[in-house]
Amino acid sequence: MPRLINSEVNGGCLFAADPGQAFDRLAIFWAPEALSTVLSLRQTAHPSAIGQYSLDWTTLAAGEVRQGLDGWHAIVPLAGAVHRLYLPEAPVKGSFLSVEMPLDASFEIRLKAAHRFWSAVEGRRLGPPPLALPHRRRHRFVLMMRALDGWLAGFSYREIAEGLFGKERVRGRSWKDHDLRSHTIRLVQSGIAWMRGGYRALLRPTSRRK
């Protein structure tokens, strides 16, 4: 039997999944310290004189809301985007809220996520998601996952390269000295690293990734 991984250690929240739904239909909840776009909200007891927004928690029925040991987690569709919220306690209806943003490496991402949520409430344009990936980087991730699938299925590096780049390109020269050989090996190694937890680098700011 494979060793079970505690999702709390990996940043996930322990909520039961519906076995009748496909994996891409299930809501995935993340803790704020693991995913920088999760907004940590706090109920404000004494609003300032400057206009503030109140959030009616009962209007979030269109999203997914779960209560955990650490508080409330919500995935809210609003203005064509999905917003992830966390509150230690369910706010009183009509209460004022503030966003908590620690000054750390993820501050810029949290700030963008908070601005998108505010823009959604205001009915403004949201702009691109804070963790949106460039097309070139997404393409490399796809190649990594395909290479990893081939490696796990027992295919050789050459067979994996033929599946990724085409047989004609691979067979046009000696495999031992082929530039695609080292490229394919790196893709497989990167895929293995991601499978073993490296995927969490996607949850961090781009400027901090290596």
Image: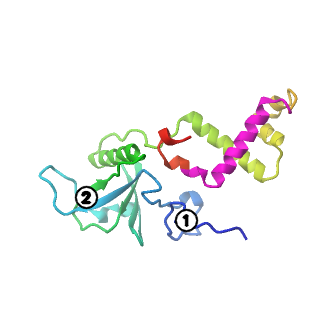
Residue that badge 1 annotates: 7
Amino acid type of the residue tagged 1 in the rendering: Ser
CA distance separating discs 1 and 2: 29 Å
Identify the image quadrant of residue 47: bottom left
Identify the image quadrant of residue 127: top left
Amino acid type of the residue tagged 2 in the rendering: Leu
Considering every residue shown, the one lying at the far front of the view is: 104
Q: Position of residue 205 (x, y in %)?
A: 47, 43
Q: Would residue 92 be found to the left or right of residue 162 on screen?
A: left
At label 2, counting other C-alpha atoms closer than 10 Å, the crowd grade (few under 14, some 14-19, many 20 or more) is: some
Identify the image quadrant of residue 125: top left
Disc 1 is placed on an element classified as loop
In the picture, which quadrant includes the N terminus?
A: bottom right
Residue that badge 2 annotates: 97
Q: Going 68% across and 47% down the picture, which residue do you hit?
A: 191
Q: Nearer the viewer, residue 74 or 189?
A: 189
Q: Nearer the viewer, residue 37 or 120?
A: 37
Q: Position of residue 9 (x, y in %)?
A: 54, 64
* Residues shaded magenta: 176-200
